[in-house]
Image: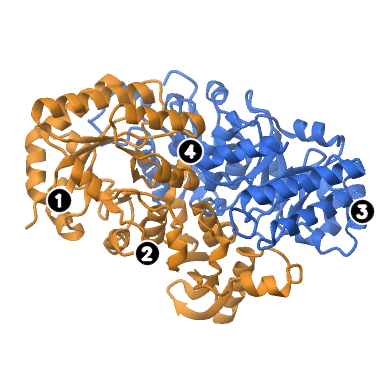
Chain colours: A blue, B orange
Amino acid sequence: MTDEPLRARYVIAAKSAGAAREVAGAVAREQTLECVPGLASPALERRLLGRVGPARPAAGGFAVAIDYAPELVAGSVGALVNLLFGNVSLLRGVRLVDVRWPGPLLARMPGPAFGLARLREETGVRGRALLCAILKPVGLSSRALARQASALVRAGVDLIKDDHNLAEQDTSPFDERVSLVAAAVAEENARRGRRCRYLPHLTGGGARLNERVERLHELGVTGALVAPLLLGWEATAALAAESGLLLLAHPTTSGVFYGRRHGIARTLLQGELFRLAGADGVVFPNAGGRFPVTLAECRTIAARLRAPLGDVRPSFPAPGGGMDLARVRRWRDVYGPDTVFLLGSGLLQEPHLGRAVEDLLRAVEPA
Amino acid sequence: MTDEPLRARYVIAAKSAGAAREVAGAVAREQTLECVPGLASPALERRLLGRVGPARPAAGGFAVAIDYAPELVAGSVGALVNLLFGNVSLLRGVRLVDVRWPGPLLARMPGPAFGLARLREETGVRGRALLCAILKPVGLSSRALARQASALVRAGVDLIKDDHNLAEQDTSPFDERVSLVAAAVAEENARRGRRCRYLPHLTGGGARLNERVERLHELGVTGALVAPLLLGWEATAALAAESGLLLLAHPTTSGVFYGRRHGIARTLLQGELFRLAGADGVVFPNAGGRFPVTLAECRTIAARLRAPLGDVRPSFPAPGGGMDLARVRRWRDVYGPDTVFLLGSGLLQEPHLGRAVEDLLRAVEPA
């Protein structure tokens, strides 16, 4: 390894430092050469075999760093995830908690194409967090969703996104839903002088996905909600590089990574890997909502999304998952202005939508 | 729900049947309407809210079935995975163990385009399991990998696949590697009268993925190794429907799903979901190899891959991950003839490759 290595820190559930280093040695081999000792030449072993550092006591076992040669990744997000936690996922008691990124590797990752700046430009919202309402529930017709969107634009939200479970259901097929909602938003924007943007859930793969991207451009839609773990790491990275759409990444199915003793820390997966894969913004469950997550983890995710990371553009945090409307002022103080707050059924059930949004807009104004 | 429901059985880590049903109720809401009670109309709640069955004691807690309306899935594999374990993944102590599939839903899933029949036709191998060698390790030049492929064809293996960590590294970039290896295999086939097939690792997304599929067709390559959890559920399904390639699915990163108390049972994920997503064959770690998995689980995966499943074609099992060459006869008895055995570094380190393959071919002949 001549270049600065990709240093991955794992916490290994083991009873002793020696046992942890033994597991780490197996991980280092599995994730790199993946062959029995003796098959690769000594030169190749020196160049590519992961290098195991000392084991230090840590919560849940022992922390061990493994240095990987960045050439194993080249420029592919898929190869990166595969290197960090591909086959190792099939073991137990190995948790990836942190990565130190070499600059040249970062330079080859897609990263976000736009970031929050584009949303600010499009919506004209400066100096405060943005409010994003969610079209729901699934099962409504495209027309009903479009009516809901009109009401939300009238009420004054900055953004509207599809609920992530709106996909290709027959009640609101992609093309019909997106066309009607985009038209409703555009019409209501024109009528009220608003600049609300719509982020439909972009689903599918292959030719269909491409057609849908085209369709969004035709409709003047400039961003989309995507589920990286359904579309794929590689498909998401390709969308970031090729689609011209701003991508808001949804965490669906990501929870399987967040085992206490096995998996990938959510602060790394949602705070860095989604960003490297090209997410302009990252949806994550907020503390105090429906999902078990700590405030400290949420703060770290938000901080990492915006932290300097080579030449990779910052992503913006989009906390949601049962946001308590009454506490939005508090969340403003936690997350700061460069945030998109997701407002789901809590907002939709307000009897006076306009007044509720007015209150929320006041609550996210800087103190 | 008027149609036959999609019945998903979860094991919930709870102390009582009542507590388990309460969690199941939250799951049923989260995975379907995903909104507070009262927001959706009573008619929509009746039609789409997941229906929770009785809780029965099971290993690890209580088993509870939830009936989902198939209309939530329509034809998308992404929506299917999202429905079964999307946001629920962000909880803890919920494990999806089994699904009962309604016929009309199956009819809209891509499923494998070819299955083992195509490999038998192409290789001419009948009545016994096929042997698939693995090109490795990463770090070798494309030329060195092509030489390895020539030696493996000479030795008489039926199939050769790229190691799954061969991606886009600068030492063997996709186009160069695949071109040289495919040429080497074709040349050696012609010289020796063999019919060995090469399955390169197909990586990337978007336009690049499409170009690579085209390139494989130009080279006369008819199948590929794919990693559904790196390419994506949707991208894999699209490849199955559109690419014309036989797809061998690799389980990389799938292990995060296989928590003892949380996630998706591997027998379901690898035995059914990969198949529904279009995998013609499914690679899984064999019992007694490098990864913790029981023989019973392996048998179930193999059985499910081949079991009747509406009009969805059968997939073939491809056990690997430290196959013990000396025990291939035993694995033949376990898995039967409609199997592809993966042979990694154990085979490559044999001093007499030809003799080793001869022995293996004898070992997989029916008793």
For the residue carrying disc 4, how many other residues have a C-alpha within 10 Å: few (<14), some (14-19), or many (20+)?
some
Please identify, in this view, whether the residue under mark 1 or under mark 2 is nearer the observer. Answer: 2
Give the label, 4 or 2, closer to the camera: 2
Q: Chain of mark 1?
A: B
Q: Which residue type carries mark 4?
A: Val
Pinpoint residue B365: horizontal percent, then vertical percent: 8, 51
As measured in the structure, the alpha-carbon distance from the residue carrying label 3 to the one carrying label 4 is 42 Å
Looking at the image, which residue is at 27% across and 53% down? B317
On screen, residue B262 versus residue A348, left or right, reads left
Task: Give the secondary structure at mark 4.
Answer: helix
The residue singled out by tag 1 in the image is: B328
Task: Classify mark 3: helix, strand or loop.
Answer: helix
Letter of the chain that mark 2 sits on in the rendering: B
Write down the residue under mark 3: A359
Give the position of the C terminus of chain A as an image quadrant: top right
Q: Residues within 10 Å of mark 2 (few under 14, many from 20)?
A: few
Query: Mark 1 near mark 3, Cβ–Cβ under 8 Å?
Result: no
Q: Earlier in the sequence, mark 1 or mark 2?
A: 2
Q: CA distance from mark 1 to mark 4?
A: 32 Å
Residue beneath disc 2: B310
The image's mark for residue A81 is 4
| Above-or-below relation of A82 to B312 | above
Residue A280 x/y as whole percent: 67, 36
